[in-house]
Image (cartoon, rainbow, N blue to C red):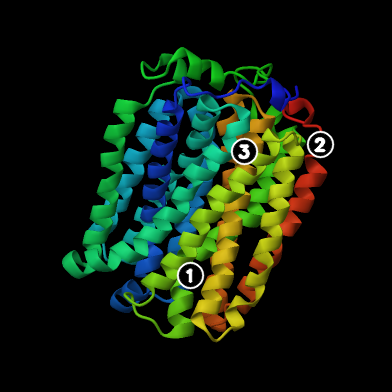
Amino acid sequence: MSLVAPSEVRTVVARVGRYRWVICALLLAATTINYMDRQLIGILKPLLQGELGWSETDYGNIVVAFQAAYAIGLLLAGRAVDRIGTHRGFSVAIALWSLASMAHALTRSLAGFITARFALGLGESAHFPVAIRTVAEWFPKSERALATGIFNAGATLGALVTPLFVPVVVAAFGWQGAFVVIGALGFVWLAFWLALHALPWQSRRVGRAELEHIASEPEDDEAPVHTSWRELLRHRETWAFAIAKFLTDPIWWLYLFWLPDFFTRSFRMDLKGLSVPTAAVYLAAGVGSIVGGGISSWLIRRGMPVNRARKLAMLACALAVTPVWFAAGVSNIWTAVAMIGLAAAAHQGWSANLFTTVSDRFPRRMVSSVCGLGGMFGAIGGMLIAWVTAHLLQLTGSYVPVFALAGGAYLVALAQFHVLAPTRAGTAGAAR
């Protein structure tokens, strides 16, 4: 089923409430905390490597443990969220990953860190499936890419805040204190979630006009309530999304877990010195998430078909990534920051639109399952890039081939997405 024409969509006037944006703000905060927890190990890598004696492959194995658990969790988390709902799903997930983050402070052994990272990966795996489904519940299709772009900016906000915040906490409480403090933030967020969130039609804070606005663009909900994996995998759109995640998610993991090390190696920076360049990259990425998500929403409001608008925004992002190919060869740190910052911004804009294609093309009750499956593919790609990067650094110390992979991955991903998910969305039920 196609979206209604923009001229037929209900105009949002002053009397229409905006509580859905409060929910979006909660998702933004959760994503920020999520990325603070996962990025902390990358910020502390030079310190922990020196103090605990890790080799490059030791660190790579710690990252692989997180990615393996993340992949396993995503395979299960999306299906679980589709069954138990967003309210309970998010509550359980953030409690689990916050406890796992705090557990890092209790160990100094390699095995202990691998165990803690595995638990963190399991908990964090539910985040994006439940967040994407929450957006599908609270927003009409024409607003979803913007809402996704806003909450997805938390990935960059967390990565921006962490390198500025961590040196202060480490100076006061040591690296163990950093894991405890950041892990505890999840429980603060959980209190707000329990107090403020409900389904739109169950919330006392949502008026009739806002409910009508949320429901103003009909969904295709003809799929069975419990869709089997076999049925899900029959859709070309499922594979298009999963392969795109496999090809491009690893690039973001690369920035998250190795960017501080790249700056330290290439420009001889300590923990305090690398905080500003690292934060600058993620500041650019945060802007890219909102702008990239807003582009396709803007095009849709002006009459462009949904599928074309999403792909045009994704093409712009894929092209903006390509200069990062040369980042490892520059001698000036701010030139490298500019190249990597542009690529990180483009990745987040790409991600906002790619995620939104799922809620465009699948009924709401299938959204978390598809996101979970795609996220699993992305995590498997992250495992591979962690292994490759660790061994390349152990053998050569060079980031050149790694950034070369980053520069071309998005164009390849977009090409396969266009082939597998053409203009008509097929039997999945979606926008044209």
Location of mark 1 (residue): 259
Residue depicted at x 32% and y 49%: 100
On the image, the x and y values in percent for residue 32 come to 40, 49
Task: Residue 356: give its label.
Answer: 3
The image quarter in which residue 247 lies: bottom right
Callout 3: helix, strand or loop?
helix
Between discs 1 and 3, the one toward the N terminus: 1
The image quarter in which residue 141 lies: top right
Q: Nearer the viewer, residue 20 or 251?
A: 20
Q: How many marks?
A: 3
Mark 2 and mark 1: span between their CA atoms? 37 Å
Whether 374 is drawn above or below 359: the answer is: below
Residue depicted at x 37% and y 26%: 197
Q: Amino acid at mark 2?
A: Thr
Mark 2 vs mark 1: in front = 2
Q: Is residue 217 left or right of residue 159?
A: right
Between discs 3 and 2, the one toward the N terminus: 3
Q: Are marks 3 and 2 in contact (CB under 8 Å)?
A: no
- Judged from this view, the residue extending furthest toward the front is 14
Q: Residues within 10 Å of mark 1 (few under 14, many from 20)?
A: many
On the image, the x and y values in percent for residue 395 come to 55, 82
Whether 364 is drawn above or below 118: the answer is: above
On the image, the x and y values in percent for residue 307 come to 74, 38
Residue depicted at x 57% and y 46%: 376
Task: Residue 122: give its label.
Answer: none
Q: Nearer the viewer, residue 405 or 83?
A: 405
Task: Residue 423: give its label.
Answer: 2
Mark 1 and mark 3: span between their CA atoms? 27 Å
